[in-house]
Image (spheres, rainbow, N blue to C red):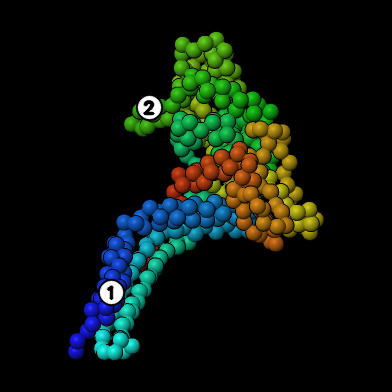
Amino acid sequence: MRLSVPRFRRFARRCRLQGLIPALLLLVLTGCASLGPNTVTRDRFDYTTAVADSWKRQMLLNIVKIRYGDAPIFLDVASIINQYSFETELRGTLGWSYPPNANRQELGGSGRYYDRPTITYTPLTGEKFARNLMTPIAPATVMSLVEGGYPIDLVFRILVHSVNGIQNQFGGSARMRRADPEFYSLLAKLRQNQASGAVALRVKKTENQAALVMVFRKRVDKEVEETGKAIRRILGLKEEGGEFRVVYGSMPADDQEIALLTRSIIEILSDISSTIEVPAAHVSEKRVPPTMEPEGEGIKGKMIRILYSDEKPADAFAAVPYRDRWFWIDDKDYQSKKLFSFLMFVMTLTETGGKEGAPVVTISAGG
């Protein structure tokens, strides 16, 4: 068989074109051969965002459920494992015969992509979990939060029942009460001293035990010194004392001790839930008690303002549906957002248990 020069050139161009397409596909597929490194950044941030959002919603839902007398349920994300698989196949045939209309070219390929996330959830239940929800937070944990930079007035307002017998307000239905008049004055003065750096904490060895000590520093200006004296008078402490033991309890043993009666996680959630706004119809139908009205603004007011609406809010920091309503925290309410995040952080500091015997997940290595 003999080809004329023009016909041979057309044949050569077709061969180059048909050979170029498989080459390009092979180049593209070879560039996608390694999936792992490219997924790390995307997956880490996507899963972090998803877990954080679900954690916020779970906490908010449990606070709302407590408000309605329902039992809180916590579900932990124990593990997240993701597998990727990318399989490709490329095939092609090229044939030629005379005359030209009998030419036959075929190019084919197939690809399969798999994304197999395996997420393990662990319900936080059992005796240990329930006991730790009801166990008061240790005074050392409370004071460590203060030393770590959290405002002492907000920490005490949320986490403490009383200081040397001076009562905080509480919204739990079992022992609802208003705060003693001296409590808010005490918090304001403690905040002033904290801002001035005149108060410090340290651990002191006493009788083979580690004791937490609050230290009122010397060499401070006159105003700070007077504030420190006022704090000691309110608490009934030694007038000229500089170091005071911090212990758990309702009342101090002497004038050199600061007794903190701290709250448990369940008490904290109950107190926060008492100020949730609820539909008037639910109150009149006895589905939920009336909302506890705050004593004032700022530290005396609602710590976390949780609203309700009939429709899903458009601009919410966190929102959950419950009993045909939406309960939510406004994203423009910075104070509520900050304290809600603080509450979630406190939850992580409390040993909640419940993770023993978590399921073993076996993941295929693929092939």
Q: Does residue 113 show up? A: yes
Tell me the element at label 2. Answer: strand
Relative placement, left or right, of 226 versus 107 is right
Q: Tell me which amino acid carries mark 1.
A: Arg
First of labels 2, 1 by sequence position: 1
| Residue 83 vs residue 75, the one in the foreground | 83
Per the model, the C-alpha gap separating discs 2 and 1 is 89 Å
Q: Could you tell me which residue is drawn at 31 percent across and 60 percent down? A: 36
Which mark is drawn over residue 286? none
Could you say which is closer to the camera, residue 311 or residue 146?
A: 311
Estimate the x, y position of residue 156 in percent, counting from the top left: 56, 34
Q: Nearer the viewer, mark 2 or mark 1?
A: 1
- Which residue appears at 71% of the width and 54% of the height? 309
* Residue, disc 2: 204
Q: Is the residue marked by circle 2 packed among few (<14), some (14-19), or many (20+) residues within 10 Å? A: few
Label tally? 2
Q: Quadrant of the N terminus?
A: bottom left
Residue holding disc 1: 13
Q: In this picture, is 20 found above or below 316?
A: below
Residue 136 visible from this viewpoint: no
Question: Is residue 355 rendered to the left or right of residue 70?
Answer: left
Residue type marked 2:
Lys
Q: Residues within 10 Å of mark 1 (few under 14, many from 20)?
A: few
- Specify the quadrant of the image occupied by residue 356: bottom left
Depth check, front residue: 312 or 224: 312
